Amino acid sequence: MTSVADLDTPVVTVDLDIMRDNIRRVQAHLARHSIGNRPHIKTHKIPAIGRMQMEAGAIGITCQKLGEVEVFVNAGVTDDVLLTYNILGRQKTDRLMALIKRVRRLTVVLDNDVVGRELSEAAGHAGADVRFLVECDTGFGRTGVQTPDEAFDLARRVMRLPRMHFEGLMTFPNRDPNTRDFFERALALFKQAGIPVPVVSGGGTPALFTAQNFPMLTEHRAGTCVYNDAMVVSTGTATWDNCAMRVRATVVSRPTPTRAILDAGSKVLTSDLYFMKGYGHVMEYPEAAVTGLSEEHGTVDLSACAERPKVGDIVHVVPNHCCVVTNMVDEVYGVRNGAVEVTWPVAARGKVR
Amino acid sequence: MTSVADLDTPVVTVDLDIMRDNIRRVQAHLARHSIGNRPHIKTHKIPAIGRMQMEAGAIGITCQKLGEVEVFVNAGVTDDVLLTYNILGRQKTDRLMALIKRVRRLTVVLDNDVVGRELSEAAGHAGADVRFLVECDTGFGRTGVQTPDEAFDLARRVMRLPRMHFEGLMTFPNRDPNTRDFFERALALFKQAGIPVPVVSGGGTPALFTAQNFPMLTEHRAGTCVYNDAMVVSTGTATWDNCAMRVRATVVSRPTPTRAILDAGSKVLTSDLYFMKGYGHVMEYPEAAVTGLSEEHGTVDLSACAERPKVGDIVHVVPNHCCVVTNMVDEVYGVRNGAVEVTWPVAARGKVR
């Protein structure tokens, strides 16, 4: 069996024990509150890990792009998929209809009439039926209708179109008090009109352990929690020991007493900074700061470190955002106790369409 | 022939006429000043484009990773490659030696003794000879020796090791006055010791059109200038009309009168912000600001726009940093006058090792 020490750097490893515990913890938490667990596979993009999540009790998976759905459906991971994206344009609606015919339950979201009309038309041509959730912007400021009235009106307009079936509401991420207020008001409108809302879908890893505060949620979508990362640790819902993904890197240069350069740059760690101060957490040197990245270099400030690495030393970096790191590499190595147990191609990497 | 209008979004296109003019302009400028043009292929990662640069008069190419050298050597693009990276570790030194035996001229850089010793040892085992430049940090604060004395001392120590051949000095990027001062002082030390310095290699696209201000440069390495991007435009050395790379994207949502959401997020445009205010320049709506990216969504503020796009409209975004966009996609489309003339796999994408 290959030793982790034999993996050339930079390389992305996933600790299999930590990941298994993460999957169990998430499933147990949502089950305790009778909320369906619909993990977002964008974090790992690996069918084998999706299967582990399904076996642990997930009700289905979430995908962000059609290309991801195709990879996971082709791999037979599940027959219940939520695609949380406005699908527009003939090429994509054709692909969507082909998928709908193959999967027991494939639901999409939409936040505008154009998408509703295009889906209805494509469904008519294909002889398919489309289940949809209305995406609600409950404070994030990205996609989604802006008010409960808009959600209700859009749902009613689109459900009247041929072959379009209203299934419920969706948001990202859950946030108190906005999300609860938004959903309560929207659900009251649907109730008054006698329209059932079987699905209310929340999302986000930072929102995972407070999902029970939103009693209307029937399911929750979280991605990052399968691995965890520096962003999640900063929110207090995980510790470094819960972070399964590590970027194994080599110190290739020590130009000054306080500077180290790693062979992992933005081409592995990415420039995702969020609200963090650095570009990742160096496990062996917790006082070190990854102050800058260029494509192939990570610049580390060692000023605060009593012990400092030398050229050729190996370090392990927990990235700020594990989902985007996944998308940078062709394979991820599943490791346990210093041994490489499995090499996973990142099958849905780069599926931008 | 496929029309550009038939390309599903998000998709990366390269205008072939603009790129051809960019290649010619760079070559003509450096030739005028008798500076060798050694384009950095990390920007395009496509052998066919490397061949265009060679045919235009480049003396060779620059690569940042061994995996890139392998792709370009296998494609037969050139027999003169500079690998501007400290190569460390048995797996990489073995690969390097195999390449050195196949290529007429493959030069590496180093900035420390550990790399020098490992290369010498590997060269001994392989029966190969290693040409090296000493990397100098002339103000950028990344890799490189810190002073002219260090450059001289390191060069002398490593050139005494078996099979190691000193070829010269290298920096990234050229910056006045530091780079000139550093090189002048270093070259004086080598001259005094009677050690020839055949190569002095400068780099950087923003530094390209002032390369002649560094009379010691024998060659210049620039990558971005083959496409250009918002960063280059901001430095004043290119206009939007010189930007060959565009990310073609669809407006998938218009949640508010001032907000548009594109189907291109950080998985295409990347989070590289540099010192820019937004995440790219929307050609059709120059007053628009790409204020945020998540993986699959680009958030655009239309407040300053008189005309505003509707759901389903197509826009073209010039990214902040074209090199990193290249690395996100499996293929790039070469277009001319609205037609797709060529589809290039990004052959050296994801070569992190």
Image: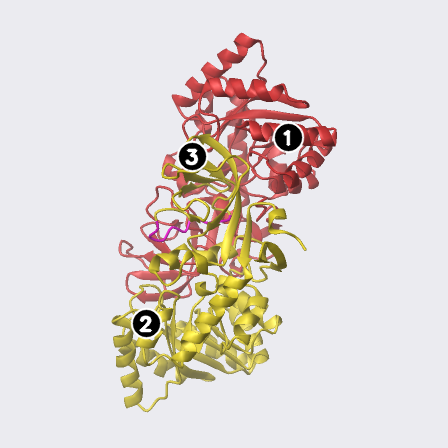
Chain colours: A red, B yellow
Q: Nearer the viewer, mark 3 or mark 2?
A: 3
Circle 3 SS class: strand
Q: Residue at x 61, y 74 (%)?
A: B76
Residue B271 magenta: yes
Where is residue B36 shown, x and y percent of the image? Answer: 43, 79
Instruction: Please identify the dominant SS of the magenta region.
Output: loop
Q: Nearer the viewer, mark 2 or mark 1?
A: 1
Q: CA distance from mark 2 to mark 1?
A: 60 Å
Q: Nearer the viewer, residue B306 or B242?
A: B306
Residue B296 position, x and y percent, is 51, 41
Q: Does dot 2 land on a helix, a strand or a loop?
A: loop
Disc 2: CA contacts within 10 A as few (<14), some (14-19) or many (>=20): many
Q: Which mark is residue A313?
A: none
Mark number displayed over residue B259: 3
Residue type at tag 3: Arg
Query: How far apart are labels 3 and 2 at the CA level?
Result: 48 Å
Which label was assigned to residue A119? 1
Question: What segment carries the magenta color?
Answer: B268-276
Labels 3 and 2 share a subunit:
yes
* Residue B308 appears in the figure: yes
Image height of A152 relative to B10, above or below? above
